[in-house]
Image (cartoon, grey):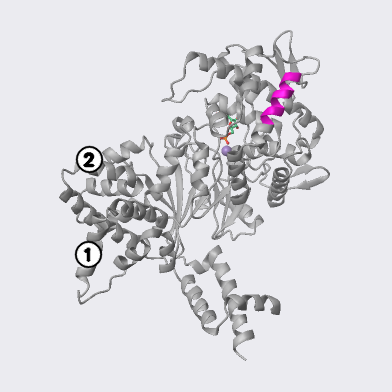
Amino acid sequence: MDAQFLDLLAQQYDTEEKVITEIINLEAISNLPKGTEHFVSDLHGEFQAFQHVLRNGSGTVKEKIKDLFREEWTDQEISDFAALVYYPEEKIQLVKGDLCNKQALNRWYRQTIEHMLKLISYASSKYTRSKLRKALPERFVYIVEELLYKTDLTHNKDPYYEEIYRQIISLGQADKLIIGLAYTTQRLVVDHLHVVGDIYDRGPEPDKIMDTLINYHSVDIQWGNHDALWIGAYAGSLVCLANIIRICARYDNLDIIEDVYGINLRPLLNLAEKYYDDNPAFRPKLQADHNVSESEILQITKIHQAIAMIQFKLEIPIIKRRPYFNMSERLLLEKIDYEKNEINIGGKTYPLENTCFATVNPEQPEQLLEEEQQVLEKLLFSVQHSEKLARHMNFLMKKGSLYLKYNGNLLSHGCIPLDEEGNMEEMQIEDQLYSGRQLLDVFEYYLRYAFAHPEETDDLATDMVWYIWTGECSSLFGKREMTTFERYFIQDKETHKERKNPYYHLREHEEICRKILLDFGLNPDHGHIINGHTPVREIRGENPVKAGGKMVVIDGGFSKAYQSTTGIAGYTLLYNSFGMQLVAHQKFNSREDVLCNGTDVLSVKRLVDKELERKLVRETNVGKKLQQKISNLKNLLEYRYMK
Ligand SMILES: O=P(O)(O)OC[C@H]1O[C@](O)(COP(=O)(O)O)[C@@H](O)[C@@H]1O
Ligand SMILES: [Mn+2]
């Protein structure tokens, strides 16, 4: 081993005792049960539903409460206590309103702190003291540790402990302590969170999801196609930029662009007012509880058309300069007969409806008006100078990747492109062919390159981010074409269909999943593939667990827009030391409902895989790192101290 490296290590471990203590510590940790991993996907801006799942650990919090208090408490008491753990600030206020006097409140404080401590002690039973300490509310660490680790068999210290409780309450610290302990519990039930893509689009609060993730103790993200689209916009892709605004207009979410990220839409609105009018195909999909005036709807409808037409124009030069994208079928504005108002797609002619081609030059449909050009420049400037967007996009890059190998499983939002025979589908980029893992690595390389060069707007890397959003071999899109144009302008629903990559029927077969796991260097006997992206239609009997348990699809529809298709309100996955469990969530109404009525419609759990023996930290990604560290320390011991 490198002497220089060992000398450096010796600076930190400068006595034999320190080295030995650390080795013992790390070996001991390696023998603890593995921490719980929590998987979510397709959040699509639904912050409220997401944070509920996060706060209740997909049902884990309630389960632990039941384990402890089932015998002595009613269901209502269990629900009340669970609500306190999820939303401590609000629940305490409600309790205060209910209790008639100070004495009763103090009694409640005393009992509640004790119950919380019991819960924490149980929830942290598989962690080291040091790990628990890091999760405790900082200002109360000393006091909480005193109460947690009381080992006074002789009861000599009973008055001492009682006094701690009394003082916390009389000094007015009980609320803060309970709130802190509630968050500690939330944090303890999940060791690590995986977000398997699609944080952005459709729902109203992706920014709040991002802020929550930024503050979360341990998280990674596998980008979804919608996340890649936002990264693309920030990285300088005008067509990605047009897409994010179009989708926000379509879902009545322009607030996200304007108010949340501070991007000025005024120039776009002016252009929209000048060239567009009302149009039924472009009216926004309104959220149930959103009050929007007729004039606002009209405004959004106009913006929606203006940006959609810009998007269709911007696609043309990219398709032409990248022949290997194989997208010439998508040169739609060139296939229109502007006089007859028809289009020829795949040899068939279709009438066009609800058209809005006022800015299109039929001779040169890709040509942007001077005004459109200027609007785009301003929008791009605004996007690239939004401090908040920069923070969120940087975090997506830092914690995100196109796919992830973690504890033997393969996590990826969309698919691994396959041909009908089940072989890895090849894609040509410039003069090279790529497939499988290599193809995904190349996509990620370009995406990172584009992000690092935001000033480049039409180089290959930037175009490639758009390809990742919509190209036929993209692992995030997983479909042959995106029929946005057809959905707006053609009545015949046949044209709206988007053919899926063969992966989506082949992934039902265990052999295929094993092959993919092997291609990614994973052990097919133990590994699973975890996908989001395609809503699982439970309603029609579709099973999210496929291929004999090798494949789990967790897009159950956090997105309200998709709940009628799935019949539930989202899946999440838990992977603890005992195995893997899928959780199907019922519709989340509101946090008020949880707080006041205790409705925490508990989610149905299904076993995906059971470990034959309890899985230990030693066998995990983290465990491998610990073993490496132990080996370094042993080398140091020999090199420095055993002479
Ligand atoms: O539901 P909308 O807004 O019409 O969007 C449909 C588009 O979204 C996509 O399904 C992609 O989004 P998802 O990743 O959420 O599936 C496209 O395939 C499709 O064209
Ligand atoms: Mn998706």
Tell which of 168 and 575 is nearer to you. 168
- The residue that appears at 70% across and 27% down in the rendered structure is 376
619 versus 62 height, above or below: below
- Judged by its main secondary structure, the magenta piece is helix
Q: Is residue 538 left or right of residue 430?
A: left
Residue 206 spot, x, y in % from top left: 52, 37
**Which quadrant holds residue 173?**
bottom left
Q: Earlier in the sequence, mark 1 or mark 2?
A: 2
Q: Does the magenta-highlighted stretch encompass residue 373?
A: yes
- The residue that appears at 55% across and 70% down in the rendered structure is 626
* Furthest residue in direction front, as rendered: 171
Single out the mark in the foreground, 1 or 2. Answer: 1
Label 1 residue SS: helix
Dot 1 surroundings within 10 Å: few (below 14), some, or many (20 or more)? few
Label 2 near label 1: C-beta < 8 Å? no
Q: Is residue 613 visible?
A: no
Q: The disc labelled 1 sits on which kind of residue?
A: Glu
414 versus 513 height, above or below: above
Q: The disc labelled 2 sits on which kind of residue?
A: Gly
Q: Magenta residues?
A: 369-380
Q: Which mark is residue 275?
A: none
User: Dot 2 corresponds to which residue?
Assistant: 97
Q: Does the magenta-highlighted stretch encompass residue 434?
A: no
Measure the C-alpha gap from mark 1 to mark 2: 27 Å
User: Dot 1 corresponds to which residue?
Assistant: 163
Question: Does the numbered disc 1 mark a residue whose Cβ is under 8 Å from ligand 2?
Answer: no
